[in-house]
Image: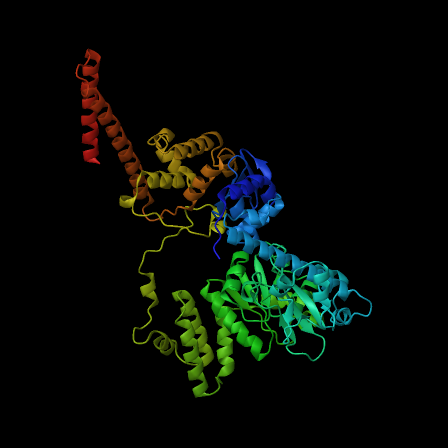
Amino acid sequence: MGIHVNEEIIEEIRRRNDIIDIVSRYVPLTKSGRNYKGLCPFHHEKTPSFMVSDEKQLYHCFGCGEAGNVIHFVMKMENLDFIDAVTLMGQWVGIHVEEISSNKQEKEELSRKNKIYEINREAALFYYKNLLKKNSPGLAYLKQRGLEESVIRRFGLGYAENHWETLNTYLIRKGYDQEFICSAGLVLEKKTKDGFYDRFRNRVIFPIINTTGNVVGFGGRALDDSLPKYLNSPETSVFHKGNNLFGLNLAKKEIGKDRKIIVVEGYMDVISLYQHGIRNVVASLGTALTKPQGEMLKRYSDEIIIAYDADAAGQKATLRGLDILNELGCKVKVIRLTEAKDPDEFVRRKGKDAFLEEVERALPFLDYKIILAKMENDVRTTEGRIQFVKAVAALLKQIKSPVEVDAYIKKIALESQISEEAIKREIFGNHMYDPSRQLQKPFFNRDKYRSKADRHTNKYSVQSVKPIQKQGYVEAERSLLKLILQDKEIFSKIKTIIPYSDFTDSVHQKIAKMIYGCYEMHGKISMEMLLNDLDIEEVKILGDIRQIVVPEENVEKALMDFIHTMHNHKLEEEKKRIERELENLEKKDSKTQEEMVRIRELCGNLEKILKELKRL
């Protein structure tokens, strides 16, 4: 359902959530000139380049380019869509979610969802209290699985007693409507249509909590021979199994600077690893990964490590998950558990360090698939080697990088004892693979005109400079600023040719003046000094300038082209100014002597500009 947002309420929520206060919940900030500064939460960096403006209520990372207002920040940090982010922020400042929509039907739907969240929370408390009762079978089971009380409490685990209507009776007595209890998926209607019975009975209960802290559903593990062994809540207005990940509400705080997430199959895998100090773990709710789950993982992490069960079903689920994550462009690896059936058993038997060693040894996507292909084909036989190479060739056809393909061809040739040339023909057919074809475009060393810090942090959206003929004066000014920012020798060459006042864009002129001043006073550039004196929007422009890549080949010519373009633009602007003044003077019916002299002067200046433009 689409939400029609009441813009005035949204603006009020944004206004009440001060960006400095909100960002400070996630990132330690210090005052730095006109802005606040801290380590960027969206990429790895050692030197703070994440700027927040109290004045403009905006943030911008000088390193990776992430930028926006306080709502965008919460959306990114909490992995929420716009409405959910605004809902959460509304709760922080006492504005109820129903007020966000201007549509009556939508208000009713939002109110309904809130009621289900409330019922789910009450049910989770009910299950938790049942678990703590004397002689609780649920608590005995969890302790037998080695769980500590603090971890049981952290995950809010519970127990559904082996009775038919205890939860339903409890919720009715609490004043909740039967229809809502049923809509939450907690009860089922009797076949006789004369009442309802609890969905979960004699099961350990695992509340499924989303990233905003709402209980959206439950998983239940049977303590007897009931089938299925694991039972989840049905699809409801607040719970869609393929859109949620168990444990993400806790893991999002534990992902750390390396931005890795480990994905397992079961609830107990997450909880057991968490208890052993491995807390960047989520579960895909007992199913293979879905695309929405993959998109959530991608937003939170740079690397996803799959650690599914070692059985055939786990392996099959791993392959489906790999394909989805690979299609989404995720960096994905696989842990092959050979000494235990699942992560829970492994970490309980061998401990945290042993599991972390398995994480370090995790196989890249392609290597894992190649190992499976080798296991399925006996490479000791001729037929097995042929089938193995055919299977791998099909995988390599999907790889875009010629370097990566070439490396794997060499590896497979050794393992299969089939020539590299034959493998290339299998992959590329009669259009023989020729690595040199891939290298016909000129190779530019992009690092030469980038700072050390920039090389490691500016990973996204780096664009080469377009040919100067297609550039306007803005691009030329920015490219020239890039060169003098990175190379003092270039600054020394052009400082007398192009004074900072020749930069026509006001922000470019301000940045140029600061760069010139840094060189003149300190002999080098102080990026911290530049950032301290720029406002948040100017910081963004400086960040864009740093991302420009100038080809190292014929830098002198590129430099002259930039200067030429700037000079040409300056002449064109002066020409337009003169023409406007002449037009205004010539409109006058009677002209003074001074005006006649001014017209002749302007005409002379215009003629000089036209001649110079013709030469350029």
Whole-percent x, y for residue 90 in the image: 58, 46
Between 422 and 319, the one lying in front of the other is: 319
Name the residue at 51% across, 63% down.
292
The relative height of residue 549 versus residue 527 in the rendered view (above or below) is below
Counting labels gives 0
In this image, 335 relative to 353: left or right?
A: left
**In which quadrant will I find the C terminus?**
top left
Query: Hey, which residue is sitting farthest right in the picture?
Result: 134
Whole-percent x, y for residue 515 in the image: 44, 34
Residue 520 quadrant = top left
Name the residue at 42% across, 51% down.
461
Between 138 and 108, the one lying in front of the other is: 108
Between 316 and 554, the one lying in front of the other is: 316
In this image, 246 relative to 166: left or right?
A: left
Q: Could you tell me if residue 167 is visible in this image?
A: yes
Whole-percent x, y for residue 352 in the image: 68, 65
The relative height of residue 296 versus residue 585 in the rendered view (above or below) is below
